[in-house]
Amino acid sequence: DYMHPEVGVKTTDPALFGRNYFNRYSAPETEEDEFADERAEILAEAAAFKKSAVAYLHPEVGVCLEDANLFGRNYFERASAPDVENMEEAKERAKILAEAAALKQLASDYMHPEVGVKTTDPTLFGRNYFNRYSAPETEEDEFADER
């Protein structure tokens, strides 16, 4: 009964009764229809704003149409679209896509410094300026604090 309040209470004893908390005379007044409608409109607008914010922050999700009257024309599959591109355009497209992939990788490396640098070429190396043997000695924190 506790886990299923939708079932309701059934009793056979006429001596048992209960008061309805919401319909009694001393119950607080309920919200008027105007205010309830306005509240519903505000909540609907807030839900629409949230949906727009999620769509803006996650462009990878894509666009889903909810209205059957909305449509778009596909530029690439139309009857008058060119069938194939020539070799020069294909090479240029490949070059542009390679540059875009390199820029994307660079931006990812810049935004996530915690990932670190990974290399597969054994001829590449780098020296740590601070941990090399010829680096000048640095003061320890306690000596620097005393000064």
Image (tube, grey):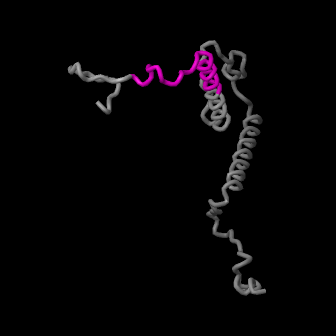
Q: Residue furthest right?
A: 147
Q: Position of residue 48 (x, y in %)?
A: 64, 26
Using residue 126 as the reference point, say whether residue 47 is left or right of it.
left
Question: Which residues are the magenta region?
Answer: 20-45
Taking the spot 69% from the left edge, 18% from the top edge, the residue there is: 73
Q: Nearer the viewer, residue 106 or 76?
A: 106
Q: Position of residue 67 (x, y in %)?
A: 61, 16
Q: Position of residue 103 (x, y in %)?
A: 73, 49
Q: Quadrant of the N terminus?
A: top left
Whether residue 26 appears in magenta in the rendering, the answer is yes
In the image, residue 25 sits, relative to residue 137, either above or below, namely above
In the image, residue 116 sits, relative to residue 44, either above or below, namely below
Q: Is residue 19 visible?
A: yes
Using residue 27 as the reference point, say whether residue 127 is left or right of it.
right
Q: Quadrant of the C terminus?
A: bottom right
Q: Nearer the viewer, residue 136 or 123?
A: 136
Whether residue 128 appears in magenta in the rendering, the answer is no
The picture quadrant where one finds residue 32 is top right
Q: Nearer the viewer, residue 89 or 38?
A: 38
Taking the spot 70% from the left edge, 85% from the top edge, the residue there is: 142
The picture quadrant where one finds residue 139 is bottom right
Q: Position of residue 114 (x, y in %)?
A: 64, 61
